[in-house]
Image: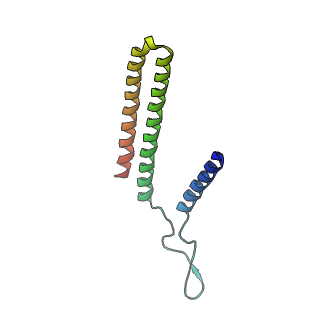
Amino acid sequence: MEKRISKIALAMIVFGVASMFMGTSTAMASEDGATAAPEHATFLTTDGARKMGGAIGAGLVIMGGAAGIGRIGGSAVESMARQPEAAGSISSTTIITAAMIEGATLFAVVVGLLAVL
């Protein structure tokens, strides 16, 4: 059931991205029946693409950083459960690594948001 839902969600994402870049109409009919090229048939302008790219990039960076820190925390807890005597060194290494990931994530979010502004 979950595979089916994920396939439907992926299809909807692909359809949404494809429809976003399609023009509003490919040709406009004039009063005499001839077709004329539209002045602006695109949905996404250069400024809009820059802002959307920056916002999507910042969101993806936050999700990646959160996944990395979560993975570090889970592995640290598992390691402490296997070797309780090494808990001190494991927790200090975990904090240092999580801080490095968070610093890189913060830098990437600032760069992404600068593209929006």
Q: Nearer the viewer, residue 71 or 112?
A: 71
Q: Is residue 115 above or below residue 77?
A: below
Q: In this view, does 86 lie above or below 44?
A: above
Image coordinates for residue 50, horizontal then vertical, percent? 42, 53
Left of 7 or right of it: where is 57? left
Q: Which residue is drawn at 37% across and 28% down?
A: 99
Q: In this view, does 18 lie above or below 4?
A: below
Left of 110 or right of it: where is 38? right
Q: Which of 73 and 42 is in front in this view?
A: 73
Image coordinates for residue 87, horizontal then vertical, percent? 42, 15
Q: Please tell me in which quadrant of the rendered image residue 61 appears.
A: top left
Q: Please tell me in which quadrant of the rendered image residue 73 appears.
A: top left
Q: Residue at x 39, y 45 (%)?
A: 112
Image coordinates for residue 83, horizontal then vertical, percent? 48, 13
Q: Residue at x 60, y 83 (%)?
A: 34
Q: Residue at x 40, y 36 (%)?
A: 105
